[in-house]
Amino acid sequence: MKEFKGRTALITGAGSGLGAAIADVGASLGMRLVLADIDNEALQAVGSRLAAHTEVTTFRCDVADSASVKALSAHAVQKFGAVHLLFNNAGVGGGGGFAWESRLEDWQWGLGVNLWGVIHGIHHVVPTMVEAALADPSYEGHVINTSSMAGFFNPPIMAVYNASKQAVTAISETLHHDLDIAGLPIHCSVLSPFFVSTNIDQSERHRPMDLQVHSEPTSSQQKFKQQSKAGMGSGRVSAEDVAKLTFEAIREERFYIFPHPRMLQSVEQRMNAIVHQLPPVEPFAYRPEIYQALKEELSYAKRAAEMG
Ligand SMILES: NC(=O)c1ccc[n+]([C@@H]2O[C@H](COP(=O)([O-])OP(=O)(O)OC[C@H]3O[C@@H](n4cnc5c(N)ncnc54)[C@H](O)[C@@H]3O)[C@@H](O)[C@H]2O)c1
């Protein structure tokens, strides 16, 4: 898609971080915006700011809930007609720690938002895009799913997040093939950043009441929290950079969007280990001190020594 002006973008997770930055760029290009988020206050703040520049509608939506995304899709069509850009972007980063220590509530919440959110977007919005394409020969659409570098390699102590993002990558690659086979004028991209400074390290603010956990965090869960916080501080690529790059990729119909291309060396190492049937390579192998520190802090031998 080369022309954005007057077309409609639907963005989930638009109240903060990458979603809000994507909304900013969309507005600057003259797009009509359907902004959705579970956090109504943050959503309204972004909506009011952008209403001065373009046509905006906001819709409080929980992407983990099918009925909520169905209602969002109906709202978008009713307000602005066909959606041209669908950003399945809402996501949470909670629920880390050793895989066997992640609570079932962590899995349900993490997969509910990061994976089912994308599934619901595809299920409820893409058919309306297909319908628009069949009705109008000039229609063009593009679906952008937010994965992560964790959709391409698997760092330790974050099984929930890795699983959710690997699945988003898999669904996106499949959607790309399906749209191509169907010969539809709808493209797909998978956006896969490494650390970008946003509010994702405070994702717990959106954990639903029925998936709250009250047990004390284990050492590995605390370590995951520390790492997420430190990662936020280390991000050199801004949300605005990522949003601009994403629109460039849509313009060029590029499928893979990697705002941190240096991390692809870790993807290459992972793929190499797979094809040579070697054990999984730790993604931060270029900084072995990170893995070593994890081993020193979280080893059961250390725990046993401390307990006497
Ligand atoms: N920031 C990073 O370093 C980074 C790296 C890789 C991938 N990502 C991905 O980018 C996406 C955006 O995250 P971000 O970094 O901008 O974080 P963020 O917390 O700043 O923004 C996420 C938004 O999603 C909303 N949200 C949370 N749960 C929701 C739900 N159930 N329904 C609807 N909205 C919900 C939040 O209210 C928030 O406004 C996520 O999918 C995340 O996994 C982020």
Image (cartoon, grey):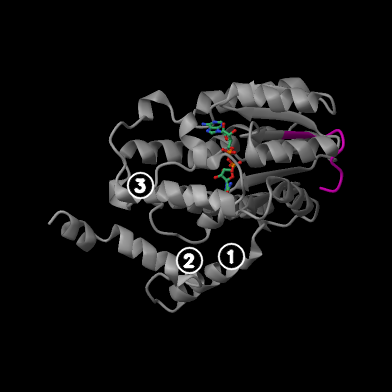
The structure residue drawn at horizontal position 53% and vertical position 54%, both measured from the top left corner, is 170
Residue ID for mark 2: 283
Confirm or deny contact between disc 2 and disc 1 (CB under 8 A): yes
Q: Amino acid at mark 2?
A: Pro
- Judging depth in this view, the residue of 86 and 297 nearest the camera is 297
Amino acid type, callout 1: Met
Considering only order in the chain, which callout, 3 or 2, is on the residue closer to the N terminus?
3
Determine the residue positioned at 40% across, 76% down: 277
Query: In the figure, 48 relative to 124: above or below?
Result: above
Q: Is residue 224 left or right of residue 47?
A: left
Mark 2 Cα-neighbour bin, 10 Å: few <14, some 14–19, many ≥20: many
- Mark 2 and mark 1 lie on one chain; the one further toward the N terminus is 1
Q: How many marks?
A: 3
Magenta part of the protein: which range? Answer: 1-9
Instruction: Give the farthest residue toward the left.
Output: 308
- Residue at disc 2, CB closer than 8 Å to ligand 1: no
Q: Where residue 29 sits in the image (x, y, percent)? A: 85, 39
Residue for badge 1? 263
Q: Which mark is residue 221?
A: 3
Residue 159 vs residue 133, the one in the foreground: 159
Mark 1 within 8 Å of ligand 1, using the beta carbon: no
Residue 232, given in percent of the width and then of the height, sits at 56, 49
144 sits to left or right of 139: left
